[in-house]
Image (cartoon, rainbow, N blue to C red):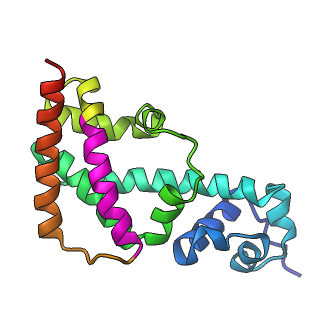
Amino acid sequence: MPPKVKITKDMVIDAAFAIARETGAENINARTVAKKLNCSTQPVMYHFSTIEELKKATYAKADRYHTNYLMNIGKSQEEITLEIGLNYIRFAMKEPNLFRFLFQSGYAEEKSLPEMIDSEELTPVLSAMQGAAGIGMEQMKEAFLIICMFAHGYASIIANNSLEYDEEVIKEHLTRAYRGAILATQEGMK
C-alpha cells in the first residue's frame, strides 16, 4: 500500500488560491479546498482552525501575486508609472475574481488610504514610481493617491464586467491622470 500524501499548509493555501482565482473567494470552504486537494476536510481544518484564517492566508498569497504582476515591467524608466497603472487595470481584466477578493472583499489589513500608502507591500511599487518620476517620496505618495483612484475606478468597472478593456483609450486617460497628479502635487508642495 503506497504511503498517503501529506497535505501541507502551503498545499491548502495553494488550493484555496486556485479556487479564489477560478470561482471567487466566496467559494473557499473546507469542502471545496478538500475536493481540490482530493482529500478529506480533516487536513484543511488541521492547518486552519477556521475558514477565516485560511482566507486571510489566501489573501496574503493573492496580494504577493498582485504585487509581482504589477512589477512585471519591461518598459523604460520614464514609462514605469504608466506600466504599473496599466498592469493594475490589466490584472482586473485577466484576474477579476482575484481583483474582487483583493479590493472589494474587506480582507485588506489596511482600513484607510493612508494605511495602504504606508504598507510594506506597496513600497516596491512606490519606489519604482518615485525613481521614474524623479520626485520625493511624500510627493509620490500624493500623486499615487490620485493615480490610484483613477486606475482603481477603471479596474473596478472592468472587473465587474461593466466596461470593455480598450488599452489605447485607457493608456491615454492614465497618461493624462498621471501628468495631472504630478502637476497637482508639485503645485501643492509650493
Could you tell whether 40 is left or right of 22 in the image? right
At horizontal 34% and vertical 56% (from top left) the residue drawn is 152
At horizontal 84% and vertical 62% (from top left) the residue drawn is 45
**Rendering coords of residue 36 (x, y %):** 69, 78
At horizontal 52% and vertical 71% (from top left) the residue drawn is 21
Membership of 159 in magenta stretch:
yes
Q: Quadrant of residue 52?
A: bottom right
Q: Is residue 75 visible?
A: no
Could you tell whether 66 is left or right of 165 in the image? right
Q: Which residues are magenta?
A: 143-160
- Nearest the viewer among 133 and 166 is 166
At horizontal 43% and vertical 31% (from top left) the residue drawn is 118
Quadrant where the N terminus sits is: bottom right
Q: Quadrant of residue 11?
A: bottom right
In the rendered image, the vertical position of residue 140 relative to residue 11, given as above or below: above
In the rendered image, the vertical position of residue 110 relative to residue 93, given as above or below: above
- Nearest the viewer among 30 and 7 is 30
Quadrant where the C terminus sits is: top left
